[in-house]
Amino acid sequence: MLLRRLSAKFAALARPFCSNTRCDLAGTIAELNKEMEVVFGERPSNGFGTSTADGVMAQETQFTSQGSEVGLGGLTHVGNTGEAQMVDVSPKVISKRTATASCKVMLGKKVFDLVSANQMAKGDVLSVAKIAGISGAKHTSNLIPLCHNITLTHVRVDLKLNPDDLSVEIEGEATCSEKTGVEMEAMTAVTIAGLTVYDMCKAASKDIQISDVRLERKTGGKSGDWSRGK
C-alpha cells in the first residue's frame, strides 16, 4: 500500500514543470514527507522536501535570471510585454564612437562605361551619390523609427569604380561623441548613396543591383571595438 502511494506521488513529481505548478509540487512534497513520517516516525534526514523544493526554486531562479539577461543583452528594442520600444540610453556614458560600413552597386558594362566617362544624362553620378550618402546619414533617425537622434561630428562617404566586376564600391564612416553608436548612420549613408547611383543610372539600365550592405567595423561604447573578420 505504501509503495503504491509513493509511486503515485513520484509520478506526480515526474510531470513536466511549468510556471503554474510550483505550488502543486511543493504540496506534493509536503504530503510525501507526511507519509514518510507516519511510516518511519520521522521525516527524511536530508530533508527531502527542503532540498528538492530548494533545488526547484534555485532552478526556477536560474531560468528567470537567464531570461532577464537575454532581454537586456539581446533584443533591447523589445519591451517586457513584447512591444517595440525606444531604448533608454540615459544611464550610458558619453564616448567617442565611429562606425564604417560598405556596399556595392553592380552596374554592368554599358552603365559602367557611361559612369566612367561621366556621360550619364543626370550628371556626375559619383559626386551626387556622395552628397546623398552624407545627407542620408544625417537623417537616419527620421528614416528608422527606433533609432536615436544623435549629433554627428563627421560623415565620410567614398565611391570608387571597380573595373574588375564593373561595380561602384561605396564606403561610409560616421563619427560622434554620444551615448549610443553610429552603426545605423554609417549603413544608411552607404545605402542612400547606392540608391542614388541606381537613380542616376536607371534610364540606361534597370538591371543594376545593390548588394553587400554591411557594417565593417565600429569603435567605442560598452561593447568596445569590433571589426568584420576578427
Image (spheres, grey):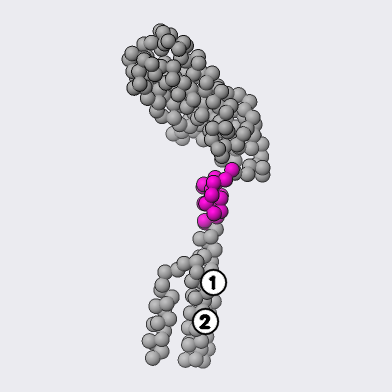
Q: Position of residue 21 (x, y in %)?
A: 48, 71
Residue 54, numbered label: 1
Q: Earlier in the sequence, mark 1 or mark 2?
A: 2
Q: In this view, does 200 lie above or below 189?
A: above
Residue 13, numbered label: none
**Quadrant of residue 139 in the image?**
top right
Disc 1/disc 2 C-alpha distance (Å): 13 Å
In terms of secondary structure, where does tag 2 sit?
helix
Region in magenta: 66-86
Q: In this view, does 16 lie above or below 212?
A: below
Q: Which residue position is annotated with label 2?
A: 30
What residue is at 60 percent from the left and 24 percent from the top?
Answer: 154
Residue type at mark 2: give it.
Ala
What residue is at 36 percent from the left and 15 percent from the top?
Answer: 204
Residue type at mark 1: give it.
Asp
What residue is at 49 percent from the left and 25 percent from the top?
Answer: 192
